Amino acid sequence: MSGPPTGKYPAKEHAQRVHKQYVSHAKSTDEVSFFISGEDLELYQYCDQTKPLRQNRYFFYLSGVSIPGSHVMYQAKSDTLTLYLPNIDYDDVMWSGLPLTIEAALAKYDVDEVKYASELKNDFDLLKSSVVLTTDINKNNDSYKEYLTAGNESFFHALDESRLIKDEFEIKLMRHAAHITDKCHLAVMSAQPIEKNETHIHAEFMYHALRQGSKYQSYDPICCSGENCSSLHYVKNDEEIDTRRSVLIDAGAEWECYASDVTRCFPINGDWTKEHLEIYNLVLKMQSTTMGMIKPGASWDDLHLTAHKVLIEGFLELGIFRKEFTAEELFESKVSARFFPHGLGHLLGMDTHDVGGRPNYEDPNPLLQYLRLRRTLQAGMVLTDEPGCYFNPFLLEDVLNGPNKKYVNTEVLDKYYSIGGVRIEDDLLVTEDGYENFTGITSDPEEISKIVKKGLAKGVEGFHNVV
Ligand SMILES: [Mn+2]
């Protein structure tokens, strides 16, 4: 596996791409400039500590810069990308060291000019005749609001459509994030002797991400065991694992603002229970069937509905759905929605649920309501394929107390509640002729079993500094 990309983040190409998209959507040849302010450090109230900074993704897309308090301007007419660094605060140098010089910034970033923020007003005055678009007015650009036009629909469209298709540099960043995540998941699966509480699973993942240089998670890790696995976004992560048998961990390291998002499930003692393995293999089949359909031109709606059909066939075989009904009847009844309540996957990029998916949360079809990607696939999209199957008493209440109850054999269903749920999630790049899977950590149940057992054989003594 190669490491992270070398060279400059292609900010200039991004700015040009956004401009091209803007011109075609706005059908305007008027002279425009784009201006976006990055995030700045902010103190906690009554405290001299700063809040964690999460860089503005639109700013990063046009600059590749993570320095707090910076701004970026793209002037389309002259095709000039200018980075404005924060003015030097001489009192702060004692504490924080010298900031990046103009020359060093020019060498590091893919921009035409680097200036200080103190030059901004003057530059805006020179631009007065042309429109300067920004996303919104906020605390970081408020001092320049008189020069800015916020909320332009074509600008958002252009930014999101550009971010939708990843370039080679972005792909390398995402492969690297995924590679770090693989090793973290492997570490979690391998450390059963020291994972007595869900928090230990969380800790193991974060520790190995940080050691590999990933300081931030793409999202709050979901670390659950047993019946807790039935909550889709369980982030409490603090219960004793005790006698529970199943673990689900959904976690992804971030690399230079780019996300990974991977879910794995495993049996705590290395031995799958019959029911856990049955559901695991079913979800794996939902994933492999849909993954095989990934290529440019495929409709994500179709893939998502195919996953439901695989689930229905599986439930008929297991006897959870009553065999007197056909797969078609069950599909039409939408009874599977409560067992697989989320979408098959979503776009992935700088945001974990990345921009450009065009979801429709108002969709009256419960099978499609929570699908975050409602588009035809194109080469260069990165997305997750993450089918799941859950046994959540709260979610199933309306199935078991409504007209769909007739489809379900509750005696058989009762055997599955203790698993909670299974989700398997990989990160995929759509290519010209199919896909590339960024995720390398195994999802094969036998291999997973071996990894867990190999870790167990080490015992507590096999791990350092356990507290
Ligand atoms: Mn996901």
Image: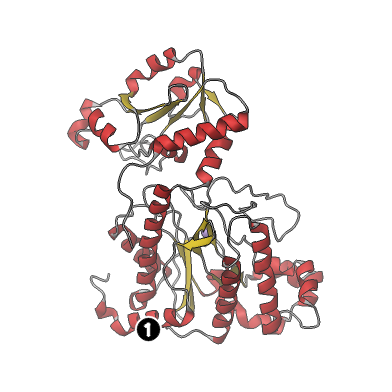
Amino acid, disc 1: Lys
Q: Residue at x 77, y 83 (%)?
A: 323
Q: Residue at x 47, y 38 (%)?
A: 58
> Which residue is located at x 69 percent, y 55 percent?
369
Residue 26 vertical position relative to residue 262 in the rendered view, above or below? above
Give SS at disc 1. Answer: helix
Which of 464 and 113 lies nearest the eye of the viewer? 113
Quadrant in the picture for the N terminus: bottom left
Q: Which image quadrant for residue 464?
A: bottom left
Label 1 CA crowd tier, 10 Å (few <14, some 14–19, many 20+): many
Q: Is residue 245 left or right of residue 279?
A: left
Q: Could you tell me if residue 106 is visible in this image?
A: yes
The colour scheme used here is secondary structure
From the image, which quarter does the C terminus lie in?
Answer: bottom left
Which residue extends farthest left?
94
Q: Is residue 383 above or below residue 283?
A: above
185 vs 303, nearest the viewer: 303
Residue 76: percent from the left, percent from the top? Answer: 47, 25
Residue 408 falls in image quadrant: bottom right
Q: Position of residue 427 (x, y in %)?
A: 48, 60
Q: Residue 244, image x and y in percent?
A: 49, 79
Residue pointed to by mark 1: 453
Q: Count up the numbered dots.
A: 1
Asked if residue 155 can be seen in this view, the reply is no
Ligand 1 under 8 Å from disc 1 Cβ: no
Is 190 situated left or right of 264 in this image?
left
Q: Nearer the viewer, residue 348 or 361?
A: 348
Q: What residue lies at 63% left-to-right and 53% top-to-bottom?
A: 376
Q: Quadrant of residue 23?
A: top right
